[in-house]
Image (cartoon, rainbow, N blue to C red):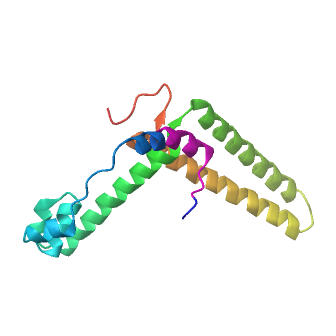
């Protein structure tokens, strides 16, 4: 049995869904015999299982297959972002922006401070600058990811209309 580790945000969102799922009756899954009796090929059965019977009749060319991969990637990413981010409070974004601004300011002040010295920068100072720069880059990348999720409708922000409307 696998143990799932959830963030607090994920756990708060999942708990009501789990309770509802435990109360609902399980869905009926067609048996292999039912599908085999229908006289379908393995490809057709797979397409029916995935909910796309039109694709069962025709083989895909490489371009169509890649387009399907791209569509599935978007779908999976969207569902994961919605699940992971849930509803974002504007205060959470502000806190992230303030933290990023502090790191940028600290980085700039350190660079200026180290540039005033006549001696070459030491290994420890260099590691401090490198670590701070990497944290800034990660926060910036994270901010861009969250902004894109908001614009794509993959994340909701309290008090903000969805971009998908």
For residue 90, say whether it is visible: yes
**45 to the left or right of 103:** left
Q: Nearer the viewer, residue 124 or 31?
A: 31
Q: Nearer the viewer, residue 108 or 123?
A: 123
**94 to the left or right of 78:** right
Magenta includes 152?
A: no
The total number of labels drawn is 0
Magenta includes 7?
A: yes
Segment tinted magenta in the rendering = 4-16
For residue 148, say whether it is visible: no
Per the picture, the main secondary structure of the magenta-coloured stretch is: helix
Residue 54 sits in which quadrant?
bottom left
Residue 44 point in image, percent of width and height: 14, 69
**The C terminus lies in which quarter of the figure?**
top left
Residue 51 point in image, percent of width and height: 20, 57
Tell me if residue 158 comes above or below residue 84 in the rendering. above
Residue in the picture at 81% in, 61% down: 128
Residue 2 sits in which quadrant?
bottom right
Residue in the picture at 57% in, 32% down: 89
Residue 88 point in image, percent of width and height: 54, 36
Q: Nearer the viewer, residue 60 or 131?
A: 60
Tell me if residue 145 comes above or below residue 129 in the rendering. above
Residue in the picture at 60% in, 37% down: 93
**The N terminus lies in which quarter of the figure?**
bottom right
Residue 103 point in image, percent of width and height: 73, 47
């Amino acid at each position: 049995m696998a143990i799932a580790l959830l963030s607090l945000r994920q756990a708060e969102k999942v708990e009501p869904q789990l309770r509802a799922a435990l109360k609902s009756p399980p869905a009926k899954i067609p048996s292999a015999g039912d599908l085999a009796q229908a006289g379908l090929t393995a490809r057709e059965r797979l397409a029916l299982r995935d909910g796309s019977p039109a694709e069962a009749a025709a083989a895909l060319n490489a371009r169509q297959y890649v387009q399907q991969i791209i569509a599935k990637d978007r779908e999976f990413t969207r569902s994961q972002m919605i699940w992971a981010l849930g509803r974002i409070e504007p205060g959470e974004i502000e806190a992230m922006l303030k933290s990023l601004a502090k790191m940028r300011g600290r980085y700039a002040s350190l660079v200026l401070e180290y540039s005033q010295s006549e001696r070459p920068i030491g290994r420890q100072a260099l590691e401090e600058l490198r670590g701070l720069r990497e944290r800034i880059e990660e926060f910036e990348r994270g901010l861009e990811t969250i902004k894109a999720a908001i614009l794509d409708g993959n994340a909701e922000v309290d008090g903000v209309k969805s971009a998908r409307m």
